[in-house]
Image (spheres, rainbow, N blue to C red):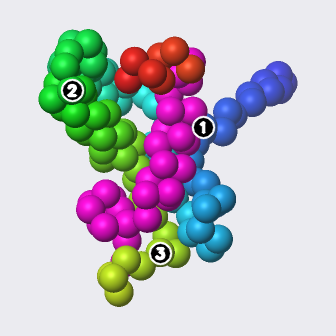
């Protein structure tokens, strides 16, 4: 009689969100989507036009540079919309915080922290961060 040793492989598990404890607001946790090929392509598609316009406006006069500053903020907003999965432990004006409420009325220092984590997740270099 022959004995066959069959090693069954256990299934792999993958979580598409990485959770972080906020450094700026104790007790707050936020989830940032991990980067996948499809999500990276989606982000590039969304910000490509903004980035091209942004670089063009930076070289212009004061009015165009104001427009470029607006472009900076629009790119930051896109990062939050694209990369923030959820926020736990925070209420804004008595309501549970969401991606939209963080952008509209939430603490900017938390938004900055979220953007920093998203950029880290993307693996962007300092020069790439300036261009995005």
Residue carrying label 1: 12
Q: Tell me: 114 left or right of 44.
A: right
Nearest to the observer: residue 42 or residue 70: 70
Residue carrying label 3: 90
Residue carrying label 2: 62
Q: What element carries label 3?
A: loop
Residue 109's disc number:
none
For the point 20% across and 15% down, the residue is 60
Nearest to the observer: residue 63 or residue 53: 63
Q: CB under 8 Å between callouts 2 and 3?
A: no
Cα distance between the residues tagged 1 and 3: 32 Å
Decide: few, some or many residues near mark 1? Use Cα within 10 Å; few <14, some 14-19, many ≥20: few
Q: What stretch is highlighted in magenta?
A: 96-125
Residue 79 quadrant? top left
- Most extreme residue toward the front is 62
Cα distance between the residues tagged 2 and 3: 38 Å
Residue 94: x and y in percent read: 35, 86
């Amino acid at each position: 009689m022959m004995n066959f040793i069959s090693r069954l492989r256990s299934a792999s598990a993958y979580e598409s969100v990485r959770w972080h404890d906020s450094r700026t607001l104790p007790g707050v946790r936020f989830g940032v989507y991990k980067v996948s090929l499809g999500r990276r392509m989606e982000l590039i598609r969304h910000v490509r036009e903004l980035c091209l316009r942004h670089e063009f406006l930076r070289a212009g006069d004061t009015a165009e540079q104001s427009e470029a500053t607006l472009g900076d903020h629009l790119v930051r907003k896109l990062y939050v919309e694209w990369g923030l999965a959820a926020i736990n432990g925070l209420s804004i004006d008595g309501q549970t915080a969401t991606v939209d409420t963080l952008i509209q009325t939430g603490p900017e220092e938390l938004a900055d922290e979220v953007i920093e984590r998203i950029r880290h997740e993307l693996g962007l270099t300092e020069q790439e961060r300036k261009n995005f």
